[in-house]
Amino acid sequence: MRINEIFHSIQGEGIRTGLRCVFIRLTGCHLRCTYCDTEYSFFEGDWMTLDDVLSQVAVFECGAVEVTGGEPLLQPGVYPLLARLADDYETVMLETSGAILMDRVDPRVIRILDLKTPSSGEVERNEYRNIDLLTPRDEVKFVIGTRGDYEWARDQVRERNLLQRCPVLFSPVVGHGLADAGGLKLYRGRLDPAELAAWILADRLDVRFMYQLHKLIWPATQRGV
């Protein structure tokens, strides 16, 4: 497999936010989302054997591992990697763009499905058959950049009964510009988080509001966090 980076950090997204986690970021992605914050993973990386990857992960003595990208399902080697991780670790997660069918993923793995919203520029690439594969252990994430994104995501949640399948998370696009907030560093995005929260409340929508915690702890462009 071609690996972009392996690092130990605080989980910044999803229902396990705040917990320790080891991240394995695979190289390569066939999408070009307008808000992507990991473009360096498109091409950079080193070839590693499965055993080498597992050895690096073991160093951190952490029970949670997440495989991410890029789009990790582009590499065939990811499937045996996920299975081996599930043999050894209590919590194994996969974050996928939702553009590739995830039916080959080991059933012990928690799938975090990132359905693409219209402003991503990749909404037509969503593989909706993945929704039928979701279990209560999985998560669906929508990254929201505009009011139009919000309305589209809200309609997907309702029409596809997503809340009956698994937790659903709405996250505002987070940019790289530092905003002054009384000494607290906050990063400007295309959407004010307060606006997104207000829309969720107005619609009585029982999704989880999510903000990228790691971008509050470290600079938004810092790697390996």
Image: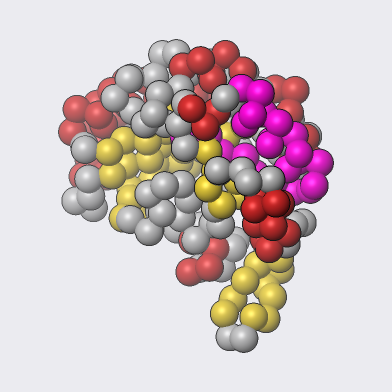
The structure's colour scheme is secondary structure
Is residue 87 shown left or right of residue 164? left
Q: Is residue 38 left or right of 85 when viewed as pictured?
A: right
Q: Position of residue 21 (x, y in %)?
A: 33, 50
Can I make out residue 3 in this image?
A: no
Does the stretch in magenta take in 213? Answer: no
Q: Which residues are magenta?
A: 139-160
Q: Horizontal placement of 121 versus 166: left or right?
A: right
The residue at the point 70 percent across, 22 percent down is 125
- Residue 154: within the magenta? yes
Is 76 in front, or is 88?
A: 88
Give the total number of marks visible in the rendering: 0
Please, is residue 16 above or below residue 54 in the view? Answer: below
Vertical position of residue 204 compared to residue 83: above or below: below
Q: Position of residue 202 (x, y in %)?
A: 70, 51
Residue occupying the point 61% across, 49% down: 171
Residue 140 appears anywhere in the view = yes
Image quarter in which the N terminus is found = top left
Q: Quadrant of the C terminus?
A: bottom left
Residue 67 at x, y percent in the picture: 41, 36
Seen in the picture, residue 129 relative to 161 is either above or below; the reply is above
The residue positioned 48% from the left and 69% from the top of the image is 217
Q: Using the image, determine if residue 209 lies above or below residue 138.
A: below
* Residue 29 in which image quadrant: top right
Residue 138 image offset from top left, x and y in percent: 42, 31
Left or right: 33 in relation to 208:
right
The residue under the point 19% across, 51% down is 61
